[in-house]
Amino acid sequence: MFICTCHGVRESQITQAVEAGARTPKAALEMCGCRPQCARCCKEIADKIRCAAQARPSARGARAAAQ
C-alpha cells in the first residue's frame, strides 16, 4: 500500500525507516529518499512512529528489568 502518493513511498519503506530510527515524518521520508510535498501522508507516518514508540519497551523499564 502506498503511504505517500506524491513520491510513491510504500508502507513497508516507512516501516523500515521507523525501525531504523526515524522519529518524525520528515525524517522517515528523507530515509526513503524524498521530502514532504503535500504533507497528506505526514499524519499517517506520525501515527506509525507513535505506535512503534509505544511498542518499544522504555529504556528505564528495560534497565529495571535487567537488574
Image (cartoon, rainbow, N blue to C red):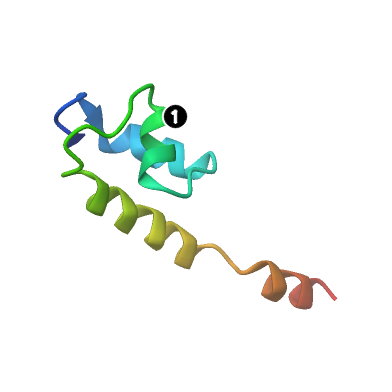
x 68%, y 67%: residue? 59
- Quadrant for the N terminus, please: top left
- In the image, is 13 to the left or to the right of 18? left
| Residue 60, above or below 27 | below
Return the x and y of residue 2 as percentages of the image width and height: 17, 34
Residue extending farthest right: 67
The residue shown at (28%, 34%) is: 36
Q: Residue type at mark 1: give it.
A: Met
Q: Measured along the vertical axis of the image, is residue 51 above or below residue 6?
A: below
Determine crowd level at label 1: few under 14, some 14-19, many 20+ residues with C-alpha closer than 10 A: some
Q: Position of residue 50 (x, y in %)?
A: 39, 61
Tell me residue 13's x, y (percent).
35, 32
Residue 41 image-quadrant placement: top left
Asked if residue 4 shows in the view, the reply is yes
- Residue ID at (54%, 62%): 56
| Quarter in which the C terminus is drawn | bottom right
Q: Is residue 1 visible?
A: no
* Residue on which disc 1 sits: 31
Q: In terms of image quadrants, where is residue 57? A: bottom right
Label 1 SS: helix
Q: In the image, is residue 32 above or below residue 18?
A: above
In this picture, is 29 found above or below 42? above
- State the residue in front, 36 or 16: 36
Total numbered badges shown on the rendered structure: 1
